[in-house]
Image (tube, rainbow, N blue to C red):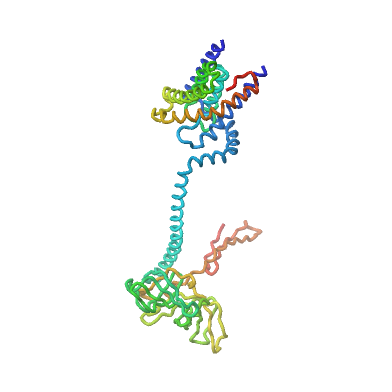
Amino acid sequence: MSVFWGRSLVAAVWVMGAVVLQSVVLSQLGLPGATPDLIVVLVAGWALSRGSLEGVIVGFAAGLLLDVIPPAVGTFGIWPLVLALVGFLTGLLADDSQGSSLTPLLVVAVAALSTLALYAGVSQLVGARAFSWSQIYGQALTQGLYAVLLALVVLPALSATLRWVEPSSPRY
Amino acid sequence: MRSGRARLALAIVVLICVTFIVLSLRGGTDSVRGAGATTLGPFQRVVSSITQPISNFFGSLTRIRSNEKTVSALQARNSELETQLRVNAGQAGAAGQLQKLLKTAGQGRIRIVPARVIAIGPSQGFAWSATLDSGSRDGIKKDQTVINGDGLVGRVTSVGATTSTVLLAIDPNSSIGARAANSSEVGIATGNGLSGLTFQLLNQSAPLQKGDPLLTFGSLRDRPFIPGIPMGIITEVKGAAGSLTRTAVVKTYVNFSALDVVGVVVGVPARDPRDSLIPRSPTPAPTVTITLTPSSTAQPTPTPSVTRAGTPRPTPTGA
């Protein structure tokens, strides 16, 4: 039971830290193309390591926080929906991705791209905000690239903290 | 089994999120963001204060080229604006002086040609002369009176096509017929450099008082001096009445060390403006006094009275 609470605490710290860093640091770097999405990397990394259930929970929590933290605008509830879906889908690959070190990076990149597409799609569906698809294509390439770069740092750190709580966790 | 729980969790989450979205579209979730700002804002502030220098550094790396462009553009713009500002400061001062000059000229119904002093005589302290940027093309002729908003500046001694030379009133070679405004005594005001003018009375026994304004007496056919232009104020009377040398020290109204906008008088008033051009002294404010007289028989009646120094006024009576 203490492992469960420890993992919950680690997840909370990671989600909180990622959301705050995302809103304060990454969004203000002014890098060319899309803003690097640390949260997708976290959700996908967690789901890859822990499976669909925790992917859904972490994705939902991160999305909720992302929709609440200032300066969030727009329709409330799209981010948790999208990130929970991504967490669930990534979690399905959890067992297959073990072994190779390239596969997690690829999965994270695909997760980042699908998050972008899902967010645009759901927004369009709900009628909250209209996206032009050319705008999304333009962001997709840099979004995937940044996700891989972030994953190179975040995934090892994530698995290290998980092993610190639960030594039997898989490593990347 | 795990996959089943995950699916259940996903279904619940999707339901919750759809509820959120519907609520949000109906405008029911604004308070959530407010609460988020209250609770999460401090975290953001702390993290931002730590990471600001780092992200600024990386941010500036990505913007290094456009920043260079911005810096050079701003520098160019800045120097341009600084020049403009300096020019404007000068223009504003000149505009103020010109306005004062026109007001003075209008009070005395004098027609003037405005001009700016572009050079002051080279032999400072010996000959006091100035060059104006207007000449015969502007209607200036020799021996015309030059004034500014404060009073007499001098007279035109030579005229070129676009420039003219003024002998300032404070030049030691300048002797101007003058009249003390209050005592109406007549004399000659001679230049004394930056220390002002020396006023010598024609009548040695005439009374002369400190603080008496000095006006130009005027010349034949108003050349070179028109009458009634304020010259200065008597600050010191030297020698007793009846003594052989009886002179007064006069402080000029015009600040000769800072001459800029002046006016050359080209049209004279139909009549002498007399004392109307003397700068006004401040008027005293009225004092309100209320006197209460105690009376044993009747109600006490306050007697208000308004007194203005110098001018008596009817005293209003009654309560």
Viewer-proximal residue among B5 and A68: B5
Q: Position of residue B244 (x, y in %)?
A: 54, 89
Viewer-proximal residue among B287 and A1: A1
Determine the residue located farthest toward the left in the rendered image: B137
Q: Position of residue A159 (x, y in %)?
A: 60, 23
Q: Quadrant of the N terminus of chain A?
A: top right
Viewer-proximal residue among A99 and B290: A99
Q: Is residue B271 left or right of residue A11?
A: left
- Specify whether residue B269 is in view: no
Q: Quadrant of the C terminus of chain A?
A: top right
x 38%, y 29%: residue: A134
x 57%, y 85%: residue: B239
- Specify whether residue A1 is in view: yes
Q: Is residue B117 left or right of residue B38?
A: left
Task: Say above or below: A32 vs A89.
Answer: below
Determine the residue located farthest toward the right in the rendered image: A2
Determine the residue located farthest toward the top in the rendered image: B1
Q: Quadrant of residue B146?
A: bottom left
